[in-house]
Amino acid sequence: MKIITAIIKPFKLDEVRGALSEIGVSGITATEVKGFGRQKGHTELYRGAEYTVDFLPKVKLEIAIAADQVDSVIEAISLAAKSEGGKIGDGKIFITALEQVVRIRTGETGSIAL
């Protein structure tokens, strides 16, 4: 089992969710987060004063899946989250080993609980 963590632009969430649904992924956790990487933020003008926005709004997706689904999930997220021409700030995908899963309601464990 694996857990995939993806950081994407907020306006791409519906597209990514749709792409994951199409390949049979049924559970996703989405969290609104802020961060920066190579994008480094930007400057904005507010009431005549210019200020720097260092942390940009992002969405963090967490998806627990069976190990054999990893490639298809990565491809679905990559295609749906990529901007036209591929720009800095499109996001990142992290894959981590998942040791155990327990469904609280039934007590099922392992891949059955996914």
Image: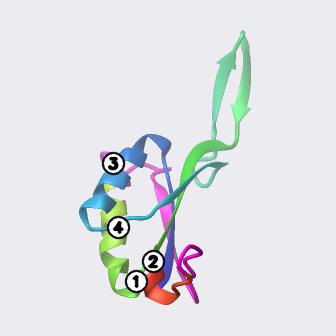
Instruction: Kindly identify which residue carries mark 1.
Output: 66
Amino acid type of the residue tagged 4 in the rendering: Val
Q: Is residue 97 magenta?
A: yes
Q: Earlier in the sequence, mark 2 or mark 1?
A: 1
Marks 4 and 2, the one that precedes in the sequence? 4
Give the residue at mark 2.
Answer: 114
- State the residue at coordinates (37%, 45%): 14
How many numbered circles are shown? 4
**Which quadrant of the rendered structure holds the C terminus?**
bottom left
- Name which quarter of the figure residue 111 lies in: bottom left
The mark found on residue 5 in the picture is: none
Query: Which residue does the numbered mark 3 point to in the structure image?
Result: 15
- Of the image marks 4 and 3, the number of the one nearer the N terminus: 3
Badge 2 crowding class, 10 Å Cα cut-off, few under 14, some 14 to 19, many 20 or more, is some
Tell me: 114 left or right of 107. Answer: left
Question: What residue range appears in magenta?
Answer: 81-106
Q: Nearer the viewer, mark 4 or mark 3?
A: 4
| Mark pair 1, 3: CA separation | 22 Å
Badge 2 vs badge 3, beta-carbon distance below 8 Å: no
